[in-house]
Amino acid sequence: MSAFLEPQNLILLGVILSLLVFSSFFSSSETALTAASRVRMHAAEKDGDRRAVIVQRLMNMRERLLGGILLGNNLVNILASVLTTALFTNVFGASKTALALATVVMTALILIFAEVLPKTYAISQPDKLALMVARPINLIVKLLSPIVSVVQVIVNGVLRIFGIDTNASAWTAADEIKGAVDLHLQEGGVAKRARDQIYGVLEIGELSIEEVMTHRKNIAMIDVDDAPEQIMKQAIASGHSRIPVYREDPDNIIGVLHMKDLLKAVTRLNGGVDTLDVKKVARDPWFVPETTSAVKQLRAFQQKREHFALVVDEYGSLMGVISLEDILEEIVGDIQDEYDEELAGVTRLKEGGAVVRGDVAIRDLNRAMDWKLPDDEGPVTIAGLVIHESQTIPNQGQAFAYHGYRFEILAKQRNQLQSLRVQKTFEPDQRSERD
């Protein structure tokens, strides 16, 4: 034991302990700077903390950051291992026992005091520690940058040989937010309705009004040449506050009848409707192309102070109608009044799944049932999804399995799928269960 107290061995021991401290510093810094919250760093930067600026800069050049830290950490660990071997050789002589002891002792020291302990501490408060180590790590990264650059060139070259693109990133900022919200939903920290609203805000920019509008076959319309009394009955029975008015052909929209305007006109006539001129009461129609984005249409509604527009295709044919409420519902969820059904077109089944009307939008069904049917591109409705996937117009009684869900055709009229039973399934995708 007295051999450890010799001056040269005490010096070696002091250097080894110092190197372990450096190794602990590098390990904790790596964990802190990779686990630190970008949001909190951005907030600290706005509050005037210049260290947060350095942290964000380091996080934005992650390859150089990790390269510098790993290079420094490996240098001190290797040097500490070599000096430990020299120390035990001085004490026990050049023997296998000395090498074995040096290996065991150094492995234990590095594992406990240079890896697990500092990283456990760093992960418990990464933001605080990231700010503390920002300046020294930034200096180290700058000093080691020439060596790190050479290492990066070699690493990227080897990865490219195996066809790996280090610049490719499948996740966007919106995907990260969605992932975080989903995680907190599972943990109970976020309500489903709040999750749906956050999703709506993130996804509204990707939608066109074609995906949000009410299709023309579901629109209540009025023929301007009908008798005034009949028009009044149709307007009241529709349950809508705005109704398109056409002449001769439903594609020939000549105006939009507002219920408030209609009631004012009837009031001026002291309740008599025989002389009511609907064409004079109706407002000019506002036509918008189906390719308009939902966000752009929302701004247009705000600028024109209008809540209702008619959607047409490139040939000018009526495709449907879009309202301010339709767009807002994509963000906040269904806005129901006393005349709305709780979940129009969807009937939940006790055994699981639901009976769904064919024209129900995939996005609405996903939100209502908490499902994950594909709605990012292609078909908009459930019927459209089945037709798209099956590449045919199914018959009543046929059943399909796609994307982890089973679709059974319950009712069909002409070429329209009117009703389907949709259930989650573990079956593999299949074209049809009955031809």
Image (spheres, helix red, strand yellow):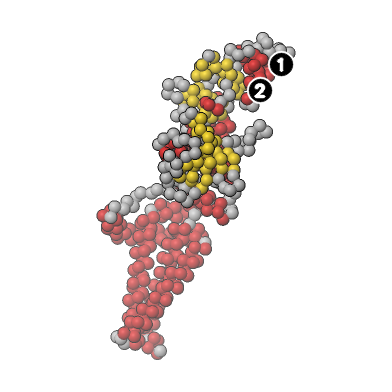
Name the N-terminal-most of marks 2 and 1: 2
Residue beneath the point at 63% across and 35% down: 341
In the displayed structure, would residue 392 be above or below residue 147? above
- Residue farthest along the right direction in this orientation: 270
Residue 422 in sight here: yes
Quarter of the image for residue 224 reads top right
Could you give the CA–CA distance between mark 2 and mark 1, rounded to whole angstroms? 15 Å
Q: Residue at x 43, y 39 (%)?
A: 435
Looking at the image, which residue sits at the far bottom?
A: 2
Q: Nearer the viewer, residue 140 or 152?
A: 152
- Residue 187 percent coordinates (x, y): 56, 55
Q: Which mark is residue 236?
A: 2
Q: Which residue is labeled 1 in the image?
A: 267
Three-letter amino acid code of the residue under disc 2: Ile
Tell me the crowding category of disc 2: few under 14, some 14 to 19, or many 20 or more residues within 10 angstroms, Cα based.
few
Q: Is residue 83 left or right of residue 403?
A: left
Picture layout, residue 407 above or below residue 30: above
Q: Badge 1 local density, few (<14 within 10 Å), some, or many (20+)? A: few
Measured as percent of width and height from the top left, residue 30 is found at 42, 62
| Quadrant housing the N terminus | bottom left
Q: Residue at x 68, y 13 (%)?
A: 273
| In the foreground, 24 or 401 | 401
Closer to us: 432 or 132? 432
